Amino acid sequence: MWQTGREKPIPAVGRDETRMILFSNGLITLDYNPATDIMTVGLPDIRTFSAVEVERALQVVVETITSYDIKKLLIDSSQAVVEVDDATYRLIILGFSQALAKTRLQYVARVESARQQQEDRAARVTEEAKRKGALSITHRNFPNAAEALEWLQAQ
């Protein structure tokens, strides 16, 4: 069941009084700073969620970007554990990339996971999305949230 409210803590990086929680449930929290036009979403350990729940959560991200006309997105994958088969992962990420391309989003900064196998798979799917034209947004990976936030603020 989808809920709104403060169910998860806000990441400490870049916190200030202008930040707003746009959406929160047991899977994702969408934290927005209108002063910088940066929305942050932290991806959790998704082993306990179904592919349908993950797809719906990513759809909420896209809907929120569209509704608020957000231009910058920080995706924090540092705590994410993705244990779905390659075909399912590929479909989810390609679908998310295609949906983002239909918004006015301009920049995506992604904080990498420490799990190398997960990062290798993410890189393969990202390259495929670029080849298919589904990833037309300026996108960079970063080792930590502070560097990702700094890059987005400079854009």
Image (cartoon, rainbow, N blue to C red):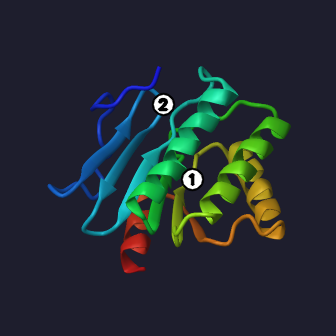
For the residue pair 152 and 72, the one nearer the viewer reads as 72
Question: Left of 82 or right of it: where is 1?
Answer: left
Tell me residue 97's x, y (percent). Answer: 67, 57
Element on which disc 1 rests: loop
How busy is the neighbourhood of tag 1: few (under 14 within 10 Å), some, or many (20 plus)?
Answer: many
Mark 2 belongs to which amino acid? Answer: Leu
> Looking at the picture, how far across and down is residue 31, in whole percent?
34, 49
Disc marking residue 112? 1
| Up-down relation of residue 62 to residue 37 (above or below) | above
Q: Is residue 27 above or below residue 108?
A: above
- C-alpha separation, residue under disc 2 versus residue under disc 1: 18 Å
For residue 27, the mark is 2
Q: Residue at x 46, y 57 (%)?
A: 65
Which of the pair 141/52 is nearer the observer? 52
Total labels drawn: 2
**Picture quadrant where residue 124 is located:** bottom right
Rendering quarter of residue 22? top left
Q: Is residue 56 left or right of 87 when viewed as pictured?
A: left
Question: Which residue sits at x=76%, y=48%?
Answer: 121
Q: Amino acid at mark 1?
A: Glu
In this image, 62 relative to 28: left or right? right
Mark 2 Cα within 10 Å, few/some/many (few <14, many 20+)? some
Q: Position of residue 76 (x, y in %)?
A: 48, 49
SS under mark 2: loop
Taking the view exactly as shown, the residue that stands out farthest to the front is 67
